[in-house]
Image: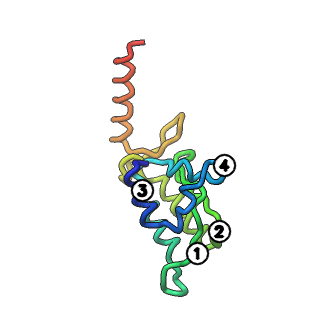
Amino acid sequence: MKNELQEKLYKDFPLIFKQKDLNIKQSCMAWGIECGPGWEPLIRCLCEHLMWDPKAGKKRENPPVAAQVKEKFGTLRFYVDGGDDKDQDIIWFAEHLSGSICETCGSMGQDVHQTQGWVRTICNSCDDKRENDWVKELNENDF
């Protein structure tokens, strides 16, 4: 994820991302949020829901803590320490939604699909650009 988007999430949800400064032996959050910028709004929405306590009608003091956030097999993975069944349901829903949102630009709709090989969820437009950039790079390197 672009550094400025990641830093904004860290700033807006410090309780959820408090493992970000730990080393790689202590937490996978040391690698940062490992997905494309198109999923930033989804992650932001997920964090807002994880921060809210509907019973008390206020922000939670002890929300689940992100242990790793990444893309795997074309969908979001949001692993946490702590939380309850409601939190796991919210996380599962966001992970499921990510399979229909372009990881690169965030578009949704019928043109979003999963690529073959290294599985990514991407829209036709971003996929075409990615393929054109790849072909251009091959031509420039002239193997």
**Can you say whether 61 is above or below 5 in the image?**
below
| Circle nearer the N terminus (2, 3) | 3
Q: Amino acid at mark 2?
A: Gly
Q: Residues within 10 Å of mark 3 (few under 14, many from 20)?
A: some
Read off the residue under disc 2: 82
Spot the residue most to the bottom. 56
Q: Is residue 84 left or right of residue 50?
A: right
Q: Quadrant of residue 117?
A: top right
**Tag 1–tag 4 contact (CB < 8 Å):** no
Q: Is residue 53 visible?
A: yes
Q: Quadrant of residue 125?
A: top left
Label for residue 7?
3
Q: Amino acid at mark 4?
A: Lys
Q: Amino acid at mark 3?
A: Glu
| Circle nearer the N terminus (3, 1) | 3
Q: Position of residue 11 (x, y in %)?
A: 43, 63
| Circle nearer the N terminus (2, 1) | 1
The local secondary structure at tag 2 comes to loop
Q: Residue at x 56, y 53 (%)?
A: 29
| Circle nearer the N terminus (4, 3) | 3
- Gap between marks 2 and 3, in whole Å? 23 Å
- Gap between marks 4 and 3, in whole Å? 21 Å
Spot the residue most to the top. 143
Label for residue 62?
1
Q: Is residue 73 left or right of residue 110?
A: right
**Tag 2–tag 3 contact (CB < 8 Å):** no
- 2 or 3: mark nearer the eye: 3
